[in-house]
Amino acid sequence: MKNKFAHATVLIVAVASLAAAPLTQTTAVHTRPDAGSPVITYLKAGTEPTPVLEAVANTPAGWMAVELTGPFEAYLLNKDLTKSLDVVPGAQLLQAPKSGAALLTNAAKDDKVTITGLHGKWTQISLSRKLTAFIAINAMPGYLPSIATAPATHSAVSKPFPLAPAPASPIAYGAGTPGRAAPMVNLGDGGASSLPRQFIGNFVSTRRPFTPRRPFDWALNDDAGRRYAYLDVSKLLLTEQIEKYVDRGVVVYGSAKNAPGGKDLLIEVESLQLR
């Protein structure tokens, strides 16, 4: 028993050192402990990564399992969304809207997911879930050499100690890109598509001179200027003041459903306010 506690102490010291040591250089964060695996993001020099204690025993020497808190930008096929706009559990969440793109993770039942755009047969989402990823500490000479012995030390302990990880430094994780879409619809509540939800985007008019009229006069665009959904404002009481919202960022509260024809998203707006 004494011997076990001695090993446990060594493990705690090693992990505590991991949490306290800032990275000495900008470091790639991989989906697996393999230099050839996809990169999720990069942690800047000076960042204090949060180690994943439960993964220490199964992490190869020279690597460290770290926790990323998100949100993460990902893409899935439209067919992996249910009629109520929920993501099918187990669906592949990719890092780009194309076949063969790097896999970020697979969807889980209780994921908090936000739709942020549409790209043909692909749906862009924001995933709010902690992910376990890996950094190569052997690529940083002199950085926490004790991690190589941590897996062996952990094997002597019957159960992981409930050591609280150090908080990560404020940093934007994820693969954000210029012009990233802004509109949001919460898909994590498990409700039907008829339930009101919140959307964020730019309120625009669909009316253009010398062009056929669209099914609805108003739409919600993402930050890149792409139409995200049509807006049905017939339930609003202050429709005479609608012009003041044109070309401005708004928060829309309403119910989402497929527009007539099934190719577009339609939001029945219940309230509208400026961002």
Image (tube, helix red, strand yellow):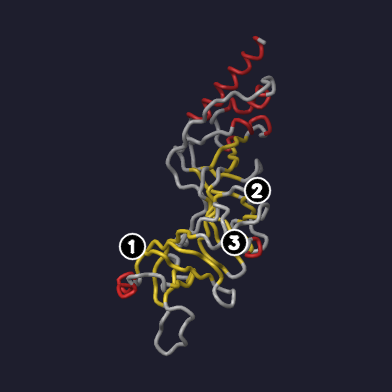
Q: Quadrant of the N terminus?
A: top right
Looking at the image, is mark 1 or mark 2 earlier in the sequence? 2
Residue 225 circle label: none
Q: Nearer the viewer, residue 205 or 189?
A: 189
Q: Quadrant of residue 159?
A: top right
Q: Nearer the viewer, mark 1 or mark 3?
A: 3
- Please state the horizontal and vertical placement of residue 241, each as a whole percent of the image: 30, 73
Q: Amino acid at mark 1?
A: Leu
Which residue does the numbered mark 1 point to in the structure image?
274
Mark 2 or 3: the one toward you: 3
Could you give the CA–CA distance between mark 1 and mark 3, rounded to whole angstroms?
Answer: 27 Å
Q: Earlier in the sequence, mark 2 or mark 3?
A: 2
Q: Earlier in the sequence, mark 1 or mark 3?
A: 3
Q: Which residue is mark 2?
A: 37
Question: Real-space Cα distance between discs 2 and 3?
Answer: 34 Å
Give the mark toward the camera: 1 or 2: 1
- Which residue is label 3 attached to? 84
Type of amino acid under label 3: Ser
